[in-house]
Image (cartoon, rainbow, N blue to C red):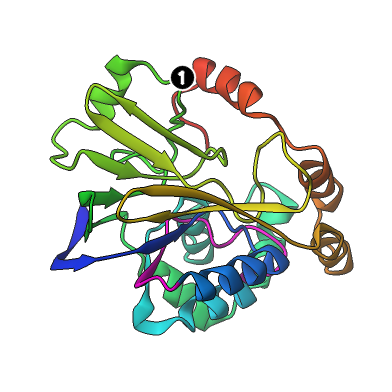
Amino acid sequence: MAEDLGTDTFGRIAVVSDVHGNVPALTAVLAQIESAEVDLVVSCGDLTWGAEPDRTVRLMAGLGARARFVSGNADRAVTELSAGLREVTRPRETWVMGLHSPASLEFVRGFPAGLVLQVAGLGAVRFCHGSPRADTELVTPGTSPERFAELSAGVPERVIVGGHTHVQFDHTVNGLRFVNPGSVGLPHHEGEPGTAYWAILGPDVELRRTSYDVTEAIEVGHRLGDPAAEVIERLLTTPPTPSEVEEDARRLTYSD
């Protein structure tokens, strides 16, 4: 169920997603957002599951009333693990949980699965993580028209914004526009390492990118003892390409 936040219309909304505890990337993006003079910042989920989730939450929570949040599958996982609702199966799960303060866990636990906002030039826009029906659904420009119809069944909004695949795109099929702002902290792309992806909505869609010090992000993971530090380093320096993500999405409808 999406949270409807009323009839106020926002002129410009910055959208971030999939930060995954990458503070150097988030700090660089927030600096550009500040100069972009937006009315609101929306996170489409997955603030956590990375080297500095607590700092990430504090940075975003510090935006106060200027920010709105949607829960991602990683946010949900960390709250379920901390509450004993999900079994710990990997060392990194224990490590990630230990990086959260009680306050940040409580903050993340309050995120809704989705929300609807009025955006100038776009009308009612639904924000989610994977899709309106599941935070683990893989949606790409190659998703079939039939599945686009299924995932938006019962959804009156004709613009949907979601993350999860870490691939930035703006795609319309049969009158339904799906926008993925891309990932701030762990993007899949063919560009330069050290690039964070995000978007601005209103009056149309602007896909944005921001450069940051990827070496710092890599060093933080190693310094804090991330069990997956080498994997994260590889993903930050030689990430999967959008075409590789497309291939995965053809085989899998959902991925956690």
Work out whether residue 130 or residue 160 is closer to the camera in this orientation and state it: 160
Quick check: 1 left or right of 197? Answer: left
Q: Residue at x 53, y 53 (%)?
A: 198
Quick check: 159 left or right of 104? Answer: left
Q: Position of residue 114 (x, y in %)?
A: 29, 54
Type of secondary structure dominating the magenta stretch = loop
| Residue corresponding to mark 1 | 142
Q: Residue at x 44, y 76 (%)?
A: 106
Per the rendered image, the range of residues in magenta is 37-53
Q: Is residue 243 magenta?
A: no
Q: Quadrant of residue 12?
A: bottom left
Number of marks in picture: 1
Q: Position of residue 147 (x, y in %)?
A: 31, 20
Q: Position of residue 161 (x, y in %)?
A: 36, 46
Q: Position of residue 193 (x, y in %)?
A: 79, 47
Work out whether residue 3 or residue 79 is closer to the camera in this orientation and state it: 3
Q: Residue at x 81, y 54 (%)?
A: 227
Residue kind at label 1, given as amino acid type:
Gly
Q: Residue at x 72, y 68 (%)?
A: 24
Q: Is residue 83 above or below residue 77?
A: below
Q: Is residue 183 above or below residue 29?
A: above
Q: Is residue 47 magenta?
A: yes
